[in-house]
Image (spheres, rainbow, N blue to C red):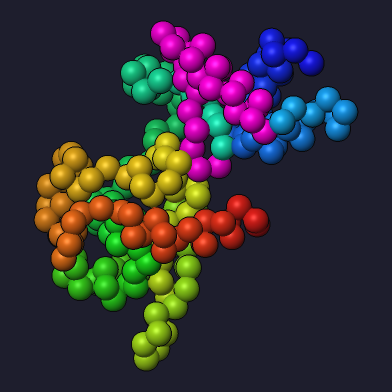
Amino acid sequence: MNNDQLKSTIEAALLAYGQPLNVEQLREMFDEFERPDAVDVRKTLAELARDCDGRPMELVEIASGWRLQVRSAYAARLSKLWQERPSRYSRALLETLALIAYRQPITRAEIEDVRGVTVNPNIVRTLTERGWIRVVGHREVPGHPELLGTTREFLDYFGLKSLDELPSLAALKDMDDVGIQLEFDGPATVQATAADLAAANDADAAN
């Protein structure tokens, strides 16, 4: 199979599947005798991404693989094609999600200590049902409270490959008090949390 055929097949798969596809999934489309190497697939994906320059769609790599998506500049107009209104989330829910994302793994009690209010069980339930958070372990203290962390679905929804791509707290817009409430003892980075959840995300992929 030549390069043009490989590129066309991969593009067709990304358009038809409607969900992210990783390199191995793309390779599995081909019979064993013609299956491309992972390096060739990645090279082809990079070429496809460049081909999208100047077009209303883009090819991006996220946590679950590669996804063809409409550029954000067109989102407002295209949203009018759907009758269903997008979900609106409360500030309390967004603050809770931000705390979990930036300080994971974290317990409900630790979230309450930072926010100064009790965590509404419906917030945790909504985030869990949305597939954005999950229990990643238990704190080794009396009662063994659950540790909460984000999921691969969370990364996919926000267009991230890993937690390292989360914006710095200083870069968050329209959530100034969240930035204050999320103050760290040290630098506001997510390098440590990425390491903490690496094993959990790998487990997600295996499942």
Left or right: 79 as drawn, with respect to 204: left
Q: Which residues are magenta?
A: 38-64
* Residue found at the very far bottom of the displayed protein: 142
Q: Nearer the viewer, residue 54 or 112?
A: 54
Answer whether residue 51 is magenta in the image.
Answer: yes
Q: Is residue 190 visible?
A: yes
State the image quarter where residue 66 is shown. Answer: top right
Name the residue: 32% across, 45% down.
Answer: 166
**In terms of depth relative to the viewer, which is nearer, 158 or 4?**
4
Against 152, is 141 above or below? Answer: below
The residue sitting at 12% across, 47% down in the picture is 176
Q: Residue at x 47, y 20 (%)?
A: 58
The answer to whether residue 135 is above or below residue 93 is below
* Image quarter of the C terminus: bottom right
**Left or right, 194 with reference to 136:** left
Locate residue 85, reporting x and y percent.
Answer: 40, 33
> In x, y percent, where is residue 14?
63, 25
115 within the magenta span: no
Expressed as whole percent of the image width and height from the top left, the position of residue 162 reads 43, 46
Q: Nearer the viewer, residue 2 or 96?
A: 2
Q: Quadrant of the N terminus?
A: top right
* Residue 64 locus on image (x, y percent): 55, 42
